[in-house]
Amino acid sequence: MLKQYETVFIMTPVLSEEQMKETVEKYQKFLVSKGAEVVFEDHWGLRKLAYPIQKKSTGFYHLIEFKAEPSLIREWEVTFKRDERILRFLTVVLDKHMLAYNEKKRNKAKAAKEEKVQ
């Protein structure tokens, strides 16, 4: 049975724009190759960390929301641990309340974006 997950990962700030995009693409391809469905993703950009990680005070944040089999998550997290470009990551299972909240938040952002265009 597919469950919906959300992963936020922080990439090292020493990456160039191209290297950062390649890293994100690598993880998208990993999910798709394993039969997962990417529902939503958002690049939060370069942000200040709450505390230094590996002597870095900033990092590129990226969020991926996806549907996958629970057995995939262990392999997913091992790939993050092996990648030196990843400072931290967190994967959570979304329950019905979190799914509703995320959907509401996306619709609100979409409406605000459409208003701005008009």
Image (spheres, grey):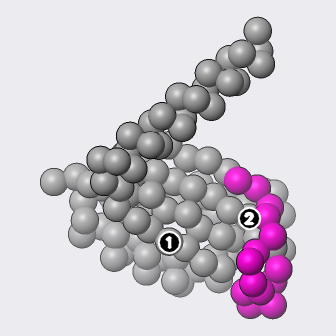
Image quadrant of residue 51?
bottom right
Q: Residue at x 74, y 77 (%)?
A: 50
| Residue 58 visible, this orientation | yes
Image quadrant of residue 39?
top left
Left or right position of 98 against 27: left
| Residue 35 visible, this orientation | no
Q: Nearer the viewer, residue 90 or 78?
A: 90
Q: Nearer the viewer, residue 113 or 88?
A: 113
Q: Position of residue 28 (x, y in %)?
A: 51, 54
Q: Residue furthest bottom?
A: 55
Mark-to-mark CA distance, 2 and 1: 14 Å
For the residue marked with disc 1, what is the amino acid?
Leu
Q: Residue at x 35, y 55 (%)?
A: 94
Upstream in sequence: badge 2 or badge 1: 2
Which residues, given as a range, are shown in magenta? 44-57
Asked whether 51 falls inside the magenta stretch, the response is yes
- Which residue does the numbered mark 1 point to in the structure image? 90
- Does 56 sit above or below residue 98? below
